[in-house]
Amino acid sequence: MNPLPARRKKHALRRFFLRPKVLLCLALALFAAAFLIVDQCVFPMRYAAALMRLPAIPAREEGQMRVLFADVGQGDCTVIQFPDGTAMLIDGGDGSLSARSEAIACCFALGVERFDSVLLTHPDSDHAAGLAELIACFGADTVWLPLFAEAEGEDGAAYAAVLSAVEESGAETRFAQTYAHFLSSEEEYFYYGMFLSPSEGESYADTNDASAVLWLEYAGKSFLFTGDASGRVEDALVRAYEQTDGAVFELDVPAYGGTRTLAPALSELTFLKAGHHGSNASTGEALLSLCSPDAVFFSAGRGNLYGHPSDSCIARVREAVPDAALYRTDELGSILLTLSADGSCTVQAV
């Protein structure tokens, strides 16, 4: 048998595969295969752009609670790390590429691996449209859904995407409504959250007024998130609180082998997230006068068409609480508040 034809075929194949174009095609094929494997099994590559710019955030120290107001433009997205290491996401921005990248980058920079809980305050697209992607990226154990979520058009599509992502994630769903609550798994670094609104059976002018209003408390400091609720809802909360000397929101719950009283004290509020991005219709005089917060945080887009935060809202804050510090994402970008177990806190742009 003559070995020459076999040798010639072997040399011909070698010359073929060593051609630059063939090598390039092979390299591209290998890259595509690796890309698909990583995308499907390790990390969704559509989120890779968020890794290009991670905020410089140090590792969380023991006992710290961190609240990050993400700069998602004219929308809302807040990431919370509790002292026990669990993480909560409130709203997800408008779903734009810039908003989604910033939100994901902030989560990675904080070290979030999975959300223990997610809250959608109401179905408006500037709060809901980015939430499905964030749930898909990080997953969630519990998702708090709006008690009232009648939405059409763009808002309806955004909310439908959220529901689909929640179902895909396998998360437990609960409704955000008055007295629904959660608290730390251990008593050492005790914190709790309670919803003050909306209430089942009440009627609301629109989905904005049906926004979830959340109270958080830790280390003697408190936070109030009001979504897009208007002054009507704020005034109702103030009246109920003042008419009962604060008892309206007190709730005894089983905890740590006994009973713990949760008692949101609006009159002693520390940090307020301005309602509806600082619109004319929210963060009213009654709420500001009762709460007198030490600091007010505004989530708004640079040069937004709505003029948020409005001059009238800023003026009300300045008049009611002259010493309050004001922090705005349209001026500072993403903002990180760090609260230590001794009650000391810092605020910084990241």
Image (cartoon, rainbow, N blue to C red):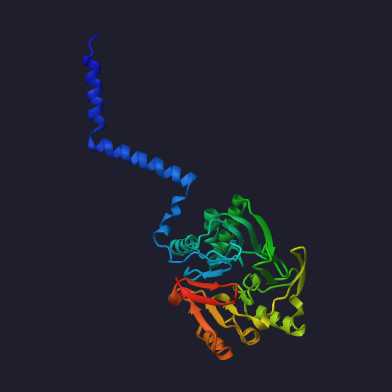
Q: Is residue 199 among the parts visible in the rendering?
A: yes
Left or right of 201 in this view: 97: left
Q: Which residue extends farthest top?
A: 1
Residue nearer the viewer, 159 or 105: 105
Q: Position of residue 84 (x, y in %)?
A: 61, 63
Q: Residue at x 61, y 54 (%)?
A: 166
Q: Position of residue 90 (x, y in %)?
A: 58, 66
Q: Position of residue 82 (x, y in %)?
A: 59, 66
Vertical relation: 12 (above or below) 86: above
All told, the count of numbered labels is 0
Q: Is residue 304 among the parts visible in the rendering?
A: no
Q: Residue at x 55, y 70 (%)?
A: 67
Which quarter of the figure is the C terminus placed in? bottom left
Residue nearer the viewer, 156 or 287: 287
Left or right of 165 in this view: 23: left
Residue nearer the viewer, 171 or 260: 260
Vertical relation: 127 (above or below) 1: below
Vertical relation: 32 (above or below) 259: above
Q: Position of residue 85 (x, y in %)?
A: 58, 62
Which quarter of the figure is the N terminus placed in? top left
Left or right of 3 in this view: 115: right
Left or right of 18 in this view: 299: right
